[in-house]
Amino acid sequence: MADIMKQLWVEEGPTEVQDFISRTVRQLTRQIADRWSPQAIIMSGSFGRGEGTVKLLHSRLYCLSDFEISVVRHCPIRTGALLAAADTWSREKEVDIGLYYNPPLKYTMQRAQRLYWRPGFVPVKYYDRCSGARVVWGRDYLANLSPVSVNDIPLWEGLRLIFNRTAQALAHLKVPEDEKERMKQAFWLYRIVISCQDALLIAAQKYTSSYRARNNRLKRDFAALHPDLCEKLPELYEMSEEATDFKLKAGMVCPRTFDDLLDKTQRICKAVSAYLIHHDLGIRWDSTPQMFDDYVHCPKVADTYYRFPSATYQRIVNRFRLRRMSPGASREFTVHHVYMLALLTFLQFHRSQEQSEDGLAFVEERLLSLLGDGIHQETDRDNAVKQTIHALWHTLLT
């Protein structure tokens, strides 16, 4: 436990930031250990890599990164118990906490590890866990993880990073009530820019766990790795460095207006997504309706893109089940295409006086109109699109 206070949790920031995170981690490990007596507690995500995002605002510290904590124990822990504890402790400490149960076999048996990856199909999250997590309590199970190669991360994992970040960002695009909300808006828009950078590095097999190292690689190799896109999108150099600095520097504030940041983020997001979709699937984004129809009917998407559903995706599906969605076409559509709708919903967002508080109806109308006849030929799909947008806006997102 004493070692926690000596560890670094952010790349750059005053001593009080490091001390604040260390105290929070120490309190959490004690509470988790007292409640469940685990074999180990593992910190992953940004704080696990020592690159968490903490901002100092009016002499008060705010954690924008969440605490991703795996509780390793022989006896299973109910998901409901983990969610309840995470919610309680999040409110007590005013930070976002994610608690996850993992059995020791996941770390000690290679056969069990292969449930989560196999050669050529390594999820980014697993790669980051192998090279960027840390044990804060108990046995070092990370030492047992099988080494994985960046060459085994498929290109579609990069696309899923973009899809996932656009879905998460939608929660923060309403008109902010205070400076803290404006800070969160900038954080999530910058996260989309970083996901675009990361997706390009994954496509070139140059990904690494460190945010700063990834940005340095993009600045060094972008023109050589993706010359066509580099010529069309020169602003990615500046925006990716700005996003990385905002992510890692406690004292940095967003230098842009919301509209400027949103506009540049949407431009980068669409250009990079279109480039990668064409590169991996052979689908051109000359028009959104045609691209969407080609994506819906692409066998590779159904066969591989959703082999490892993320927590974001699972939350949407679970909410659909709770709402008793009709089976059949709607659910099948949701399983295979919810991520693309997250991206399209984000790209269609803009703020106006008429829909400043809630853009759902506006975005739904724009998106259905944009997709046009290809949607309305199938009533079930039309309904599925609407339900998916509602889930993205009100579920994930609240």
Image (spheres, grey):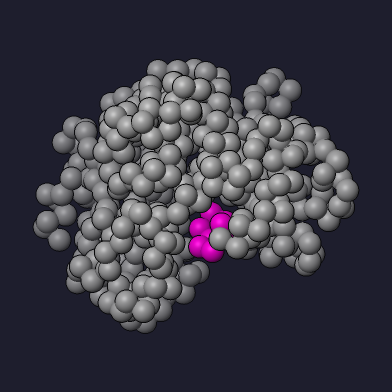
Q: What residue sits 52% from the left and 34% below the top?
A: 272
Residue 54 placement, left or right of 91: left
Q: Is residue 319 visible?
A: no
Residue in the foreground of this view, choosing between 260 and 197: 197
Q: Residue at x 78, y 67 (%)?
A: 327
Q: In the drawing, does residue 381 fall left or right of residue 192?
A: right
Q: Quadrant of residue 365?
A: top right
Give the x, y percent position of residue 13: 21, 33
Residue 280 is covered by the magenta coloring: no
Front-most of residues 67 and 205: 205
Q: Nearer the viewer, residue 295 or 398?
A: 295
Q: Position of residue 61 (x, y in %)?
A: 31, 35
Q: Is residue 82 left or right of residue 49?
A: right
Left or right, 186 with reference to 365: left
Would you place residue 217 above or below residue 383 in this image?
above
> Which residue corresponds to the image point at 77% horizontal and 59% vertical from the top-left?
330
In the rendered image, is residue 146 in sight?
Answer: yes
Count of numbered marks: 0
- Quadrant of the frame with the N terminus: bottom left
Region rendered in magenta: 305-314
Image vertical order of residue 198 relative to residue 255, above or below: below
307 inside magenta stretch: yes
> Which image quadrant is residue 16 in?
top left
Residue 349: percent from the left, percent from the top?
65, 30
Where residue 132 sits in the image (x, y, percent)?
27, 53
The residue sitting at 64% across, 38% down in the picture is: 284
